[in-house]
Image: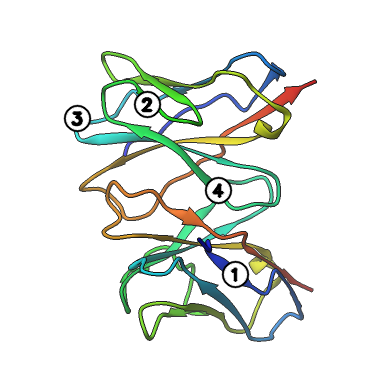
Amino acid sequence: DAKTTQPTSMDCAEGRAANLPCNHSTISGNEYVYWYRQIHSQGPQYIIHGLKNNETNEMASLIITEDRKSSTLILPHATLRDTAVYYCIVRGRGGANNLFFGTGTRLTVIP
Amino acid sequence: GAGVSQTPSNKVTEKGKYVELRCDPISGHTALYWYRQSLGQGPEFLIYFQGTGAADDSGLPNDRFFAVRPEGSVSTLKIQRTERGDSAVYLCASSPGTPRGNEQFFGPGTRLTVL
């Protein structure tokens, strides 16, 4: 599975959109982009995943560039409860069974 | 419905002791995973079960670590002769079928402290 690069930390004002970037320049054609988040003292929580089309669900939107080398997770109206570490993971259908988390982006939502 | 549960939530033990950590996956989930998370790091894969069998144990750090899932539901992670470096949060996750493409549902973890 391809590796990902994320900023170590980001801040976002409460009520504003939080845009979390992820670089996955070595992604291959059958690999999906997954996002999980981990709120302090909890287990990771699935957010969203996509292959090449943009995806939206009740939690977030995932924008994948046309060349699929990067993506952005968007939380449209960040709340204090969105403060967490966000992990971008690339995983193929024929790839490893496990998720490779890396160190993620620590998002702090500021009142 | 009930999520993944793990017991105990906290475990303190002394160096050299044996510990068992339990995971109850979501009912009906055939896939089960164990991860370990050290302070400031993301979770690291340990072992994956499909049903009763360990389909991938490549993440177990050494032979002191062992996991079982005898009836294809509850799993137990066993650590022999614990060392201080084993201190971490041990996370369990389950998913409904084959892992590829399916999201994993995580439990709250067991915080193990080896004194």
Give me the chain letter of mark 3.
A
Q: Which residue is mark 1?
A: B6
* First-in-chain label (2 vs 3): 2
Viewport quadrant of the N terminus of chain A: top left
Q: Are marks 1 and 2 on the same chain?
A: no
Q: To which quarter of the image does residue B87 belong? A: bottom right
- Residue A87, position in %: x, y? 51, 36
Compared to residue B102, the image places residue A22 above or below, namely above
Give the Cα distance between marks 2 and 3.
12 Å
The secondary element bearing badge 3 is classed as: loop
Closer to us: mark 3 or mark 1? 1
- Residue A3, position in %: x, y? 39, 35
Give me the chain letter of mark 2.
A
Amino acid on which the number 3 mark rests in the picture: Gly
Viewport quadrant of the C terminus of chain A: top right
Give the Cα distance between marks 3 and 1.
36 Å
Q: To which quarter of the image does residue A106 belong? A: top right
